[in-house]
Structures are given as C-alpha cells and as structure tokens.
Amino acid sequence: MLTVCCWCSGLAQDVQLPEAYLKDSFPVLVHKAAGVLSSAYMVQELITVTDTLPGWEGFPVHLYAYKTGVDGRTGRRKKALVYLLNPGAEKLAVWVATACWITKKSVASVYTDQLLNWVRAQSGGQFPVKGIVYEDQYVKGYQEPYLFKDGVTVYAKDSAKWAEHGPFSDEQLQFFIRVKNKDLKSETGQYARICSTSREDYLAAGGKQDVGSKANRRLIWLTVVRDLYKKAWNSDVNPLMVMWAKQHLK
C-alpha cells in the first residue's frame, strides 16, 4: 500500500492506494489523463513562466497567448491572454485516483473514468489563474469570453473594460491578466476549476468559510479556491476534487 497525506476540509487523514493498482493500472490512468490534458486548448503560445505572480508566489504559473477557432458571430478567430496552472498527466491521475479512493474506497475504472471524463468536459484540466477564457458551451461555434481569477469566473466592475462577446484590445487583455479583487464585482461565478466544485460541495464537505450560496456568491470564494488548489499542487490529493466527488461521483 502507498500512503499519502490527504488534506480536506481542515482534516488530515492517510490515504492508502493499493500497490497492485499502482503497478498494473496506474500507468493506464496516467495515459488517460494525458488524453484529457491534450484538449487544453488555451495551451498554445507560451509567453513566460513565473513564480512571483501576486497571490501565487512560489507556484510555476504559465502565461499563454492563444486564439480560438473561427467565431460564428464574427467569422474571425479571437485572441486572449491567460495565466494557467495546469497539472501534468501524472499529477492529474494521482488526484483522480485518490479522490475515488477517498470517496468510494475503489480505484475501479467505473469511478476514475467518470471523474476524468467530468474534468475533460468541465475544464480539460485547465486551471485559469487569471485572464480570459473563451468557451462555446452554450452556442456551438460562438466563442463567448469569461474573465477568470483564481480558478473562478469573475466580473469586471468597470463596464468600459468589458465587451459582451469580445474580442478585446491588447490594453484590455493586459488589464485582465493583472486584475485585482478591487476591480471586480462582489459576486463571482458558481464553480471552481478543474472539476466545477461548487460552494455547496465545499460546505457539504465541512468547509468553514462563509462562501455564500448560489443566491449570494461571495467574493471570498476566490480565496478559498486559491488556497485549496495550492494545497493540491503540493499534494497527492486535490481537496476540490474530493469535495466534488463526495457529492456527485456515482
């Protein structure tokens, strides 16, 4: 058995993965995780890697420039800048395995595949630290912009900085990768990358911070998500993934 330390909802516990699984099945999971990460469409032109980004000091945050596919509204590709802190295939595979083991006491593919496929659909394994994320989730081919900070959708306080459908000027894009909490509206999006963990998932798992609810989406959610993802980065356990799995893994 391999013992790893799990931090979740402020409680430490030991998580033991079967050695036979690590020897025989884990490489397959790593291969599947690599397939998920291959869909990370924002990983295009690497501009720089920094470990001094405010709030993320000590973490290897990657700044990417990327372009969308042809937008159905404009007939042109849209460009964006975004800081990402994406896991590698082995890290993602370990997070998936431990989340399934903690919640189901099993690393059977019925669980690991379900969680990996969910991550693929929700984020492609991409964690946007700061910047613009284009998605066509509601209307296929229409690339809609979303401002992200600390893995969560946020909204610019100054409407002059925003264009509903994009594209954005170079000046706007620079603003978005430098955005601070004071530049944001007090309400955030509902979900946290990389597997759309909600406030309700966090609270059900014993989370202590008053992060609000669907009707009161408090800005402190950004701080909570950032801190949990930082813990995950230096651990074999992703608390945000465990919180989602406890409520939704079937």
Image (cartoon, rainbow, N blue to C red):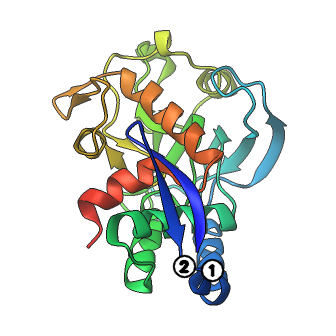
Residue in the picture at 64% in, 51% down: 86
Is residue 74 among the parts visible in the rendering? Answer: no
> Toward the viewer: 154 or 9?
9
Q: Does 126 sit above or below residue 163?
A: below
Name the disc covering residue 18, or none. Answer: 2
Q: Residue furthest top?
A: 182
The answer to whether the residues at label 2 and label 1 have Cβ atoms under 8 Å apart is yes
Q: Does 91 sit above or below residue 107?
A: above
Residue 185 placement (x, y as % from top left): 36, 17
- Name the residue carrying label 1: 22
Q: CA distance from mark 2 to mark 1?
A: 7 Å
Residue in the picture at 28% in, 45% down: 205
> Toward the viewer: 74 or 234?
234
Instruction: Please identify the quadrant where the N terminus is shown.
Output: bottom right
- Kind of residue sitting beneath label 1: Leu
Residue 224 placement (x, y as % from top left): 43, 30
Q: Quarter of the image holding residue 69?
A: bottom right
At label 1, counting other C-alpha atoms closer than 10 Å, the crowd grade (few under 14, some 14-19, many 20 or more) is some
Residue 213 placement (x, y as % from top left): 20, 32
Q: Does 169 sit above or below residue 14?
A: above
- Kind of residue sitting beneath label 2: Pro
Residue 216 placement (x, y as % from top left): 20, 25
Residue in the picture at 44% in, 12% down: 158
Direction from residue 69 to residue 143 in the image, left or right: left
Q: Nearer the viewer, mark 2 or mark 1?
A: 2
